[in-house]
Image: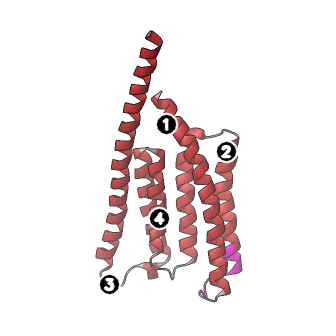
Amino acid sequence: MEKQIFSQNEARVHSMLLKVSWGGVVVGVLMLVGIRIAGLSDLLTVNQIIGAGVAGIILFGLPTIFLKSKVLLSVMKYLLIAASIIFVTVLCYLLPQLNESFAFYYYAVVVSALYLDPKLALFSALLSIAGNIFLLSVHPELIPTVSPPGQLGARFLAFALAAAGVYCFIRLARNLVRKVANQQSSLFSMNQYL
C-alpha cells in the first residue's frame, strides 16, 4: 500500500513539474527577450536567447518523451531536477549582471520536497551549489566584492539550510504516509475479516 501511494505521488509530481518547467521555459525566454528589447543588457544576443529556448526544449522535451513512453521512470525525478537546475544555470549564465540570480536555484531545492525523497533533496542542493560554483568560475564578476568568503559561505549555507528544512519535511511527510498506509491496510484487513 505504501509503495503504491509513493508511486502515485511521484507520477503526479512528474506531471506537475513538467507543466511548471515548460511554463518556466516560456517565461524565461520571454524575460530574456524583454531584457534585450528594453536594452537592459549589452551582453545578451538574439542567438543566446534562441540557445536558451533550445536548451529548455531539449532539457524538458526529453523527460516529456521519456515519461510518455515510460522510459527511465526510475530516475525521472533526478532527470527533472537536474534539467531544472541546468536551465536555471543557462539563464543565470546569460544574465551575469543579475547578482542575485543565484536565488533561482532555491526553486529546485524546494520543489524536490514534492517527491518526498530525502536523497533527491540532497541531490538538488548539491547540484545547485555546483551550478553556483560554475557560474562564479565563468563570471567572476558575480563574486561579491564585500567579504566574498563570508557572502559565498552564507549563500551556500542558505542552500544547505534549505535542503535540511526540505529533508526534515520529507522525513515527516514520509512517516505520516507510512502511518496512514499501515492504518488503511489494517482497516482493510479488519473489513475483510468481518
> Amino acid type of disc 3?
Val
- Res 85 seen here: yes
Q: CA distance from mark 4 to mark 3?
A: 22 Å
Q: Is residue 43 magenta?
A: yes
Rendering coords of residue 160 (x, y %): 34, 59
The circle drawn on residue 66 is 2
Quadrant housing residue 42: bottom right
The circle drawn on residue 6 is 1
Cβ–Cβ under 8 Å for marks 3 and 2: no
> Amino acid type of disc 4?
Tyr
Q: In the drawing, does residue 80 fall left or right of residue 189?
A: right
Pointer 4: what residue?
Answer: 105
Rendering coords of residue 167 (x, y %): 36, 49
Q: For numbered disc 2, what is the local secondary structure?
A: helix
Query: Between 112 and 99, which is closer to the camera in this rendering?
Result: 112
Q: For numbered disc 4, what is the local secondary structure?
A: helix
Q: Which residues are magenta?
A: 41-49
Label 1 environment density (alpha carbons within 10 Å; few <14, some 14–19, many ≥20): some
Give the color scheme: rainbow, by chain, secondary structure or one colour: secondary structure
Q: Residue at x 34, y 54 (%)?
A: 165
Query: Between 172 and 130, which is closer to the camera in this rendering?
Result: 172
Please identify, in this view, whether the residue under mark 1 or under mark 4 is nearer the observer: 1
> Amino acid type of disc 2?
Phe
Q: For numbered disc 1, what is the local secondary structure?
A: helix
Q: Is residue 63 magenta?
A: no
